[in-house]
């Protein structure tokens, strides 16, 4: 699988990253698949050449990943995990240190490559920088963290206000941002500045529900017509985005959605979350396919040019 340089980290990451969260959490949600099958999904991704795995304290999938990577050369894998910022507990030096130790134990490793503050809201940003970044920098000095990352809470911050603020500081090596063909607003507000500052980017929400479930797609497009962000002249609601799969252009809407993100300038690792081995194989194939034809990409840019209010959740 192709690799990219993850901005100033200089890490050589595969263009696909295995996502341990999202709606699937590797299949480990309440009525999900047995743990051994979730472990198998991660191992299949590694066997296919994927070297980037994203998880978080909050997902409950760190231990699945720890078991999946056991026995694999550690230096060949890039692990990204996160400190929860919304569980009502104040973030203190002690609980960040304790959380990282717990993450390391579950991941069966003695360092993480990228440690993020997870789902940071704009209102909390200044406090976290003042209080938490020095702790993260100490942990980095100790060799327990290699690079510092920050992720947005896109559903509550659809205009990327927190990341735009974070871009003004020279702290973050990596940013995780929501971007997909429905809402491309991060192109100007986050991805371009990241290129200028050589910050690594991780793309979340490439597919999510709206681009994987036809009913959700239809509802989302209808909503966008009602808000005036989408022109009804541009879309056929009886066959939403049918032009993407016509004439063999893409295998499916998820295929088109992953490829759209994969070739976006400034987008480094495209995260893909699944609890379904067949979807994993499809997504691995999608992220190795060539770009969508240029006129199709331009058409998607044109149709969704005014969309800022949805995430595809
Ligand atoms: N704020 C944050 O830090 C934050 C927030 C969200 C996500 N993330 C990270 O980003 C990763 C990626 O986000 P995401 O998991 O939402 O990714 P995604 O790849 O955009 O969407 C995953 C969803 O699409 C479905 N899906 C995947 N491949 C499919 C296919 N080929 N056909 C049909 N449906 C398909 C999955 O269901 P199935 O299980 O049925 O395949 C799942 O419901 C997460 O796993 C997590 O690591 C971080």
Image (spheres, rainbow, N blue to C red):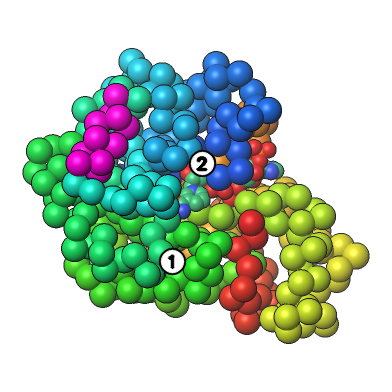
Quarter of the picture containing the N terminus is top left
How many labels, in total?
2
Marks 1 and 2 close (CB-CB < 8 Å): no
Disc 2 is placed on an element classified as: loop
* Label disc, if present, on residue 92 of the rendered structure: none
The relative height of residue 89 versus residue 101 in the rendered view (above or below) is below
Q: According to the image, label 2 marks what residue?
A: 21
What is the quadrant of residue 226 in the picture? bottom right
Q: Residue at x 64, y 56 (%)?
A: 313
Question: What residue lies at 82% left-to-right and 55% top-to-bottom?
Answer: 215
Q: Residue at x 25, y 64 (%)?
A: 127
Give whichever of 307, 30 is nearer the camera: 30
Residue 195 point in image, percent of width and height? 33, 69
- Up-down relation of residue 21 to residue 121 (above or below): above
Residue 296 on image: x %, y % = 67, 69
Q: Which residues are magenta?
A: 94-105
Mark 2: give few (<14), some (14-19) or many (20+) Cα within 10 Å: many
Mark before the other along the chain sequence, 1 or 2: 2
Q: Give the overall secondary structure of the magenta segment.
A: helix
Front-lying residue, 299 or 201? 201
Q: Is mark 2 within 8 Å of ligand 1?
A: yes
Residue for badge 1: 265
> Where is residue 242 shown, x and y percent of the image?
81, 61
Who's the residue at 41% across and 64% down the image? Answer: 121
In the image, is residue 277 above or below residue 145?
A: above
Q: In front of the other: label 1 or label 2?
A: 2
> The residue tagged with tag 1: helix, strand or loop?
loop
Residue 287 placement (x, y as % from top left)? 54, 46
Separation of disc 1 and disc 2 at Cα? 25 Å
Q: Taking 7 as reference, is 61 above or below it?
A: above
Judged left or right of residue 99, residue 239 is right
Q: In this rendering, does residue 112 appear at all?
A: no
């Amino acid at each position: 699988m192709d690799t990219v340089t993850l901005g100033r980290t200089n890490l050589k990451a595969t263009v696909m990253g295995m996502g341990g969260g999202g709606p699937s959490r590797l299949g480990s949600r309440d009525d999900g698949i047995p743990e051994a099958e979730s472990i198998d999904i991660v191992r299949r991704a590694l066997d296919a050449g994927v070297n980037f795995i994203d998880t978080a304290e909050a997902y409950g999938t760190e231990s699945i990943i720890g078991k999946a990577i056991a026995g694999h050369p550690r230096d060949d894998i890039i692990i990204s995990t996160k400190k929860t910022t919304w569980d009502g507990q104040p973030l203190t030096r002690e609980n960040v240190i304790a959380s990282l130790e717990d993450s390391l134990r579950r991941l069966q490793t003695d360092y993480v490559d990228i440690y993020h503050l997870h789902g940071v809201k704009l209102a909390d940003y200044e406090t976290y920088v003042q209080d938490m970044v020095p702790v993260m920098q100490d942990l980095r000095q100790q060799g327990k963290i290699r690079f510092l990352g920050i992720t947005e809470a896109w559903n509550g911050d659809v205009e990327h206000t927190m990341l735009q603020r974070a871009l003004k500081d020279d702290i973050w090596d990596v940013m995780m941002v929501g971007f997909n063909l429905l809402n491309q607003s991060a192109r100007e507000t986050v991805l371009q500045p990241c290129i200028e500052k050589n910050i690594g980017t991780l793309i979340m929400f490439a597919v999510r529900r709206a681009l994987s479930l036809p009913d959700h797609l239809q509802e989302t497009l209808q909503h966008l017509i009602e808000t005036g962000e989408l022109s009804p002249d541009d879309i056929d609601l009886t066959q939403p985005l049918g032009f993407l799969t016509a004439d063999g252009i893409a295998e499916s809407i998820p295929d088109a959605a992953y490829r759209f993100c994969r070739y976006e300038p400034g987008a480094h690792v495209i995260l893909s979350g699944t609890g379904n081995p067949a979807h994993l194989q499809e997504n691995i194939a999608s992220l190795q396919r060539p770009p969508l034809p240029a006129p199709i990409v331009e058409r998607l840019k044109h149709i969704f040019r005014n969309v800022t209010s949805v995430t595809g959740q």
